[in-house]
Amino acid sequence: MKIVIIGGTGLIGTKTANLLRGAGHEVVQSSPSTGVNTLTGEGLDEVLAGADVVIDVTNSPSFEAKAVLDFFETSSRNIAAAEKRAGVGHHVALSIVNTDRPPGNGYFIAKVAQEKQIKASGVPYTIVRATQFFEFVGAVAQSSTEGTTVRIAPANVQFIAADDVAAAVAEAAVAAPRNVTYDIAGPDRIPFNELVGGWLKANGDQRILVVDPSAQYFGATIDDSTLVPLGEARLGKIRFDDWLARSAAVPA
């Protein structure tokens, strides 16, 4: 099976490619660095020629609300058009759990727009919605830092390891398209402040953690239902403490 991963040189794309190649599939990792630009459409027809499955794990280079919306709407439209020309039979996309719920978060709004385009494209699809990754806890700490203080809400979260995300995406890619959206999440619900505090301690980070119920997550106010699945979800195998113990945490 020929599988093209768009955004394939990033964290999830690389891990997914390794899993699929290990299972014997022909995998092409595409990105702007390989000459494929989903915003302009450049290189899409060439890379999708003969593809059975397309995996979209692209990410916007900007987190500004209008820019990220334009990115996902334009990219999704160009990818779908190229898939139809190539006769691709299955589109797999990675999205975010509860992306349609938090108010005021431009990135989440853009992911909703992406999902709508995928569903309306006419190409058979599977959308995997994941919770946030352990690998991004450092970035969360940085975005929540004021001086030497890190302000984090005590809301429960259910972060997941990138390895578990890649496994779920790879599994979806080799299965038949189901035209469904489903959730994946980490095995445990953990107060957000404990998650970030654990990362700071493991990395010898001397910033002071302050528990603040009003602290926002990238512009959105969160509670116990924001960053966890609200219904049934497939759970990853890797727990946060185990990930901290065996992974090189990403510096803030």
Image (spheres, rainbow, N blue to C red):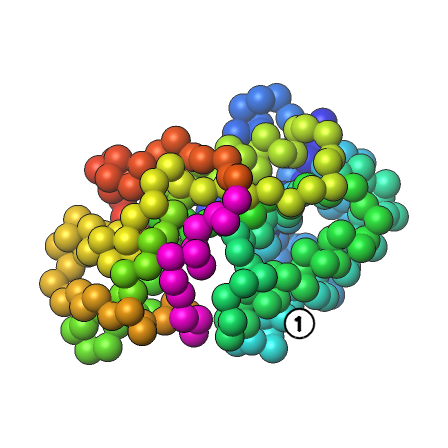
Q: Visible in this render: residue 133?
A: yes
Question: Is 45 left or right of 218, judged from the image as shown?
Answer: right
Instruction: Give the magenta range.
Output: 219-231
Q: Is residue 69 above or below residue 246?
A: below
User: How would you rate the neighbour count of disc 1 (Cα within 10 Å): few for under 14, some for 14-19, many for 20 or more?
Assistant: some
Q: Quadrant of the rendered structure where residue 27 is?
A: top right
Q: Which residue is mark 1?
A: 70
In x, y percent, where is residue 71?
Answer: 64, 67
Q: Is residue 19 left or right of residue 122?
A: left
Asked whether 36 or 64 is in front, the reply is 64
Looking at the image, which is closer to me, 113 or 61?
Answer: 113
Say whether residue 229 is magenta: yes
Task: Tell me what residue is drawn at x 66 percent, y 72 percent.
Answer: 70
Left or right of 154, for residue 113: right
Secondary structure beneath label 1:
helix
Q: Based on the displayed image, in which of its 4 quarters is residue 176 positioned? A: top right
Residue 33 position within the rendered picture, expressed as x and y whole percent measured from the top left: 58, 55
Residue 251 in view in this figure: no
Residue type at mark 1: give it: Asp
Q: Residue at x 30, y 48 (%)?
A: 190
Residue 105 on the magenta span: no
* Quadrant the N terminus occupies: top right
Q: Residue at x 73, y 36 (%)?
A: 178
Residue 60: x, y in percent? 56, 64
From this view, report whether residue 70 is shown above or below residue 164. Answer: below
Magenta portion: prevailing SS class: loop
137 to 165, vertically: above or below? below
- The residue at the point 36 percent across, 71 percent down is 216
Classify the position of the C terminus by image quarter: bottom left
- Tell me: 181 left or right of 143: right
Above or below, comparing residue 177 to residue 145 in the picture? above
Residue 55, how many percent across, how many down?
A: 65, 43
